[in-house]
Amino acid sequence: MNCIGSLDWERFSNKTGIIFSVVDNPIGMINWRNGKPKSYYIKNGANLKIIAGKDVFDLKENPNLSEFELFREEHPDSHFIMHPLMEEITLKKSKTRKRVLDISQTKLFESDNNKWLFSGTYENWIVAMKNRKWGIREGHRDSWRNLQKGDYALFYAMKPTSRIIGFGKVKEIKEETSLLWPDEIRENNSKYPLRIIFDDFYFLPENEWNKGIKSYDLEKSHGINLIHDEEKFYGNLEKLKKLLKNS
């Protein structure tokens, strides 16, 4: 999708003999912050929506790129939806974990619950492990609001560990201003007021964190990262479960 000609399906069909059928699933992107590719796609026939909680900006309804970029900057944790303008696509949320689509359709990801990766420092995960909770900065409120009971999350400890060290199932979310994590206490500042309480909660023993999963294929640049690729998520989760079983 990094080629601006990727939307020129007629040209592609003429060269390959492959004819695309209409699909009812758009392409979804999370935290796509580089503006240049988006402008290429827009100019070459794509429609884009920015979805940030209840706030939505639809270029088809308001084709003003300046306002589009302003909205994007004001909503850093947005979800982008893209599809060719010539197709009428209705967004649908599946009620089943998986469904097999007809050959004329395609899908990227469908599931009852979202999958996440939470990223933080070694010392903060020590506290999280003892309290069965995680905290997110105010700037990621839109992503935090999308958390639901039953969502699963992998836990990633940053350098020097740089490993996935545990996982858990979300029980509830709530705001708290208590100082819990070491950097909050040192700075006397509630840096992570958006809290996540866990139900099922599993960690490798602390002395084995350096043996955790060194995953290169999952987004982990923020404290909270939505994972769209279900296969990659479960692949890493299964590896972690095997480590937990043998620890």
Image (tube, helix red, strand yellow):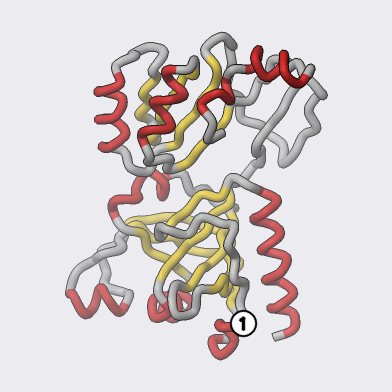
Q: Which residue is situated farthest in the left direction here?
A: 188
- Amino acid type at mark 1: Lys
State which quarter of the image contains the N terminus. top right
Residue that appears at 49% across and 19% down: 46
Q: Is residue 131 visible?
A: no
Coordinates of residue 201 in the picture (x, y in percent): 58, 70
Give the class, few, some or many, for how many residues have Cα within 10 Å of label 1's Cα (few <14, many ≥20): some
Q: Is residue 15 visible?
A: yes
The reply, left or right, for residue 143 in relation to residue 230 is: left
Residue holding disc 1:
211
Coordinates of residue 173 in the picture (x, y in percent): 43, 55
The reply, left or right, for residue 88 in relation to residue 222 is: right
Coordinates of residue 94 in the picture (x, y in percent): 66, 32
Mark 1 lies on a secondary structure that is helix
Q: Relative to the observer, which residue lies in front, 148 or 239?
A: 239
Residue that appears at 18% across and 75% down: 187
